[in-house]
Image: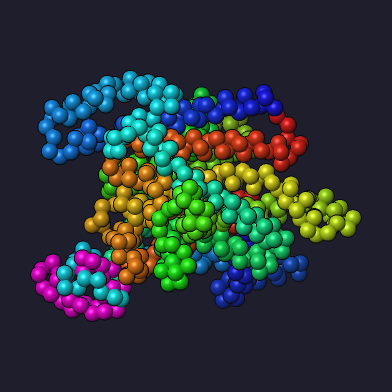
Amino acid sequence: MFAFLARRLAATIPVLVVVAVLVFLMLRLTPGDPAAVLAGDAASPDQIAQIREGLGLDKSIPEQFVIWAGRMLHGDLGRSYYYKTEVTTLVAQRLEPTLSLTVVTIIVAVLIAVPLGVLAAWRFGGWLDRLLMGFSVMGFSVPVFVLAYLLIWGVSLKLGWLPVQGYKRIADGLGPWFTHLMLPAITLSVVYIALIARVTRAAVLETLGEDYIRTARAKGLPESKVLMRHALANAAVPIATVIGIGIALLIGGVVVTESVYAIPGLGRLTVDAVLARDFPTIQGVILFFSLIYVVINLLVDLSYVFFDPRIRY
Amino acid sequence: MASSAPPVPAPASGTAAPDFEALSVESATVVVQPSLWQRVQRNGSVRLGGAVLLLLVVIAIAAPWLGTVDPSLFDPASRDLLPGKSGEITTLEGETIEHTFRMGSDSFGRDIYSRVVYGTRVSLLVGLFTALVAVSFGTLLGLMAGYIRWLDGILMRVMDGLMSIPAILIAIALVAMWRGSLLTVVIAIAIPEIPRVTRLVRSLVLTIREEPYVEAAISLGTPTWKIMLRHILPNTVAPLIVQGTFICASGILVEAILSFLGVGLPPDIPTWGNVMAEGRSQFNEFPHNIFFPGIFLAVTVLAVNILGDGLRDTLDPKMAKRV
């Protein structure tokens, strides 16, 4: 197990290095001059040169990368051009809303999608199955922000059941925190539900054809136990995998959802940073999101041991 | 997957006449296998998605003749009109003409209907070119990874890294750095899609290389480039068409998201995302400014996805079984 952990961690490091290089190059090998952007239109060439020097932009690209990567390893994501604070502080400030939103979304999505997928596979070809498959194609196709506005319009403006926009911190009370999160979480979970339900259905459909399912039924096990203990349990690995891979989709959705619902989280920070051409913040946020994604998928890999005792590392 | 498609209508007797001569030779039933193209044409999802998409292509091409005005025209006298209201609009020649605002007007007095109809052009072009760019680069890289041993490891690590960054973040960052234009938006959306294609082609290459007919070709001394062109590439076409369709759908979606967030195409270009972005501030009073382009966007992406599902079921049955 420890040997596996070490090997798996070692395999993660090159991915992170590649991510770091890509993120660095993405923002440095582009035509725009950050110093000129930062200085504004009225700046003289002298001022621009001064800013460039101050940011270390006058050095060669490899030199810049080494300096930047060294700082990164010390947990220093640099200083925001726009907010004039450390990027790490900025990320920490914006973490709570995003974490709340994603955790609630994942819980809601898994609780809805997995049972739906199991039932659809159980009644393969039935009305629920067709409905679910239809819904999942819709879920992939309806843009997050269109859905968001549809919900705001219907639930908040017409019915007045939930707040339109904004975010309340957990410290301000669980009630307001939850009511403000409900619509964004529903919005964000639709794509995720579509994805997880589809994979759950396919995976359970496969296990339902196995001999041990027939044996379980033959020995008179109640259908619910056949489904949960035999069919679903053996389909857990692909489901866990798609939950992990789907995090990328979720992060993309967070950027949009937070903008529509005016939630001051990391997604909103990304958009604001991009609009202000705030390089260190963009780099920091992208690196942070990618790190989360890689770590979650590492955890998913490790969870296989728990879901499938045959897998031993 | 096949179950989700509407029942396939039986081939009409007029269109596919049975081969009577073949039948008369022997009384044994001759099962005529429908060709791949026939199976694709008979697939319900392909028909539905294809028909809607065709309609959208017609709308895009015929945009100037569909009762629209130039999408950049505005008239301060016709601001914030409700759908169906008549008003006036000033043409580029300075002429003021009567115009019915089918979908209302925005806060500049521009005709939303015209902007949405013209927006169809942008979305379809972005989707098409994103798919083309991602598939061609992905295929090239996939062939290289599958054939050049020393490159394989490096290339696939880079792809792993690229896949670890959420697609929208890559697109947003790239467009922001390059400034939005049709070309940069297409490239920025295509780049995060490339790894998927590369992986697909690489795995196909590795499988097909082991096929007996390829081994036979190798033993006959066929040059590598000829094997690639004659044996490998034709076998990647069907899965690539399927993958390309899904990339097209996500390209259309991501372009709208970028424009909506204000980091996509410049606001003067009529795109569905831009129309929606402009409608944001007035959403409470005029929700239709967001809903009309939103419906077009959702229907378009849905049509492309349904088409992709149908193509996958018929062209790539192995993949259809997997999900």
* Picture quarter with the N terminus of chain A: top right
**Residue B120 at x, y percent in the picture:** 34, 63
Magenta segment = B84-112
What colour-coding does the image apply? rainbow
Quarter of the view holding residue B285 = bottom left
| B311 to B206, vertically: above or below | below
Q: Is residue A15 magenta?
A: no
Q: Is residue A16 visible?
A: yes
Closest to the observer, A258 or B253? A258
Q: Give the residue displayed 26% in from the left and 52% down from the top.
A: B266
Which residue is situated farthest in the left direction here? B94
Give the percent coordinates (x, y) of residue B292.
36, 68
Q: With B86 as the anchor, is B91 left or right in this view?
A: left
Observer-nearest of A266 and A299:
A266
Residue at 58% in and 75% down: B12
Q: Is B312 placed above or below A1 here?
A: below
Quadrant of image for the C terminus of chain A: top right
Would residue B104 be counted in the magenta stretch? Answer: yes
Q: Position of residue B186 (x, y in %)?
A: 35, 48
